[in-house]
Image (cartoon, rainbow, N blue to C red):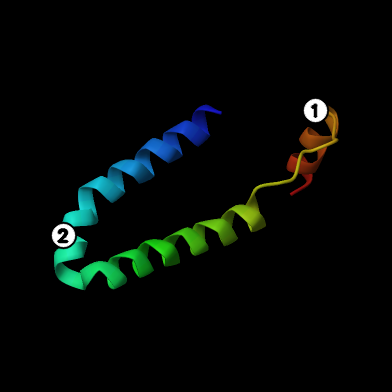
């Protein structure tokens, strides 16, 4: 949970840091398209790299992580 919160706060900080500059440079449509592309890439990353743990014991999760 702490890794999730860290990621959330970090991404929120990056958006607040870059939003006005991107809005001025790319305009509204370009800014939101860029943010949507980043979200799509991070979604693909999460789907490919984060294992599903629903319905598994801690021992099964540990065994799967050790075999990769």
Residue 66: % across, % down: 75, 40
The quadrant of the image that shows the N terminus is top right
The crowding category of the residue bearing disc 1, from other C-alpha atoms within 10 Å (few below 14, some 14 to 19, many at least 20), is few
> Which of marks 1 and 2 precedes in the sequence?
2
Please give the name of the residue rendered at 25% of the width and 67% of the height, measured from the top-left corner: 28
Q: Position of residue 9 (x, y in %)?
A: 38, 36
- Give the residue at mark 2: 21
Q: Secondary structure at mark 2?
A: helix
Q: Which mark is residue 1?
A: none
Q: Quadrant of residue 19?
A: bottom left
Q: Secondary structure at mark 1?
A: helix
**Left or right, 40 with reference to 60:** left
Q: Residue furthest front?
A: 28
Residue 46 against residue 27 in the figure, above or below: above
User: Dot 2, how many residues are within 10 Å of its Cα: few (below 14), some (14-19), or many (20+)?
Assistant: few
Total residue callouts: 2
- Looking at the picture, tell me which residue is in the foreground, 35 or 29: 29
Q: Residue at x 74, y 49 (%)?
A: 68
- Snapshot quadrant of residue 36: bottom left
- Residue 63 placement (x, y as % from top left): 82, 37
| Left/right of residue 31 with respect to residue 47 in the rendered view | left
- What residue is pinned by disc 1? 58
Query: What is the C-alpha distance between the residues marked 2 and 1?
Result: 45 Å
Q: Is 47 positioned to the left or the right of 54 in the image? A: left
Q: Position of residue 23 (x, y in %)?
A: 20, 63
Above-or-below relation of 53 to 23: above
Q: Residue at x 80, y 28 (%)?
A: 58
Name the mark nearer the viewer: 2 or 1.
2
- In the displayed structure, 62 sits above or below 12; it is above
Looking at the rendering, which quadrant does residue 35 occupy?
bottom left
């Amino acid at each position: 949970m702490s890794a999730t919160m860290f990621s959330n706060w970090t991404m929120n900080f990056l958006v607040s840091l870059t939003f006005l500059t991107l809005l001025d440079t790319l305009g509204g449509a370009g800014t939101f398209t860029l943010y949507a592309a980043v979200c799509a890439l991070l979604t693909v990353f999460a789907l490919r790299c984060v294992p599903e743990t629903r319905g598994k014991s801690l021992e099964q999760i540990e065994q799967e992580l050790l075999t990769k």
